[in-house]
Amino acid sequence: QVQLVESGGGLVQPGGSLRLSCALSGGTFSLYAMAWFRHNPGKQREFVGDISRSGTGFTYVDAVKGRFTISRDNAKKTVDLQMNSLNPEDTAVYYCAAVISTPDWVSGRENQYTYWGQGTQVTVSS
């Protein structure tokens, strides 16, 4: 049974950085495309970014381009989200998601993803 566990959330001041990590267990990590989504109460869950199985395909939502970077380590079975220049609008619960895919497939559509983590809270506030 595939499980995803996020870590690294917390409270950070505007302009600061956080690095989230998502660990996959119960499956062959290198077969999965991975993505990050976020949910702020009162809003719909929002796509943040994704990375292909091969690690060479990426997409990001416009709001985070140039500030957030996704990376994966197939040996460690983890996908990370480096978040820089954080602002209060980035406050949300961040979720990672996974789906078995072809090597270069990426998608920002949440209904394409099979497995989801429990989420980690990120709060950007002074």
Image (cartoon, grey):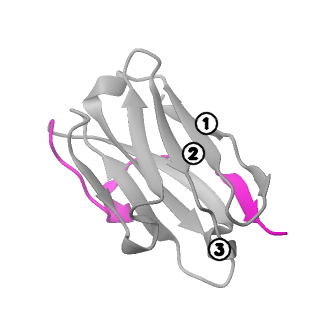
Residue at mark 1: 5
Q: Which mark is residue 121?
A: none
User: Where does the image place residue 106, in percent across and percent down from the top left?
Assistant: 23, 52
Spot the residue most to the top: 75
Q: Secondary structure at mark 3?
A: loop
Residue at mark 3: 40
Disc with the residue nearer the chain's start (2 vs 3): 3
**Residue 109 is a magenta residue:** yes
Seen from the viewer's position, the closer of residues 90 and 27 is 90
Residue at mark 2: 117
Which range is magenta?
Answer: 103-126
Q: Are marks 3 and 1 in contact (CB under 8 Å)?
A: no
Kindly report the distance in space between the C-alpha atoms of the residues bearing marks 3 and 1. 19 Å
Q: Secondary structure at mark 2?
A: loop
Spot the residue most to the right: 126
Q: Is residue 125 left or right of residue 90?
A: right
Residue 118 showing in the rendered view: no
The crowding category of the residue bearing disc 1, from other C-alpha atoms within 10 Å (few below 14, some 14 to 19, many at least 20), is: some
**Residue 11 is a magenta residue:** no
User: Hey, which quadrant is residue 61 in on the image?
Assistant: bottom left
User: Where does the image place residue 114, in percent across and percent down from the top left?
Assistant: 38, 48
The crowding category of the residue bearing disc 3, from other C-alpha atoms within 10 Å (few below 14, some 14 to 19, many at least 20), is: some
Residue 21 showing in the rendered view: yes
User: Where does the image place residue 111, in percent across and percent down from the top left?
Assistant: 35, 63
Kindly report the distance in space between the C-alpha atoms of the residues bearing marks 2 and 3. 16 Å
Kindly report the distance in space between the C-alpha atoms of the residues bearing marks 2 and 1. 5 Å
Q: Are marks 2 and 1 in contact (CB under 8 Å)?
A: yes
- Under mark 1, the amino acid is Val
**Residue at 26% across / 58% down in the picture?**
107
Q: Is residue 41 left or right of residue 113?
A: right
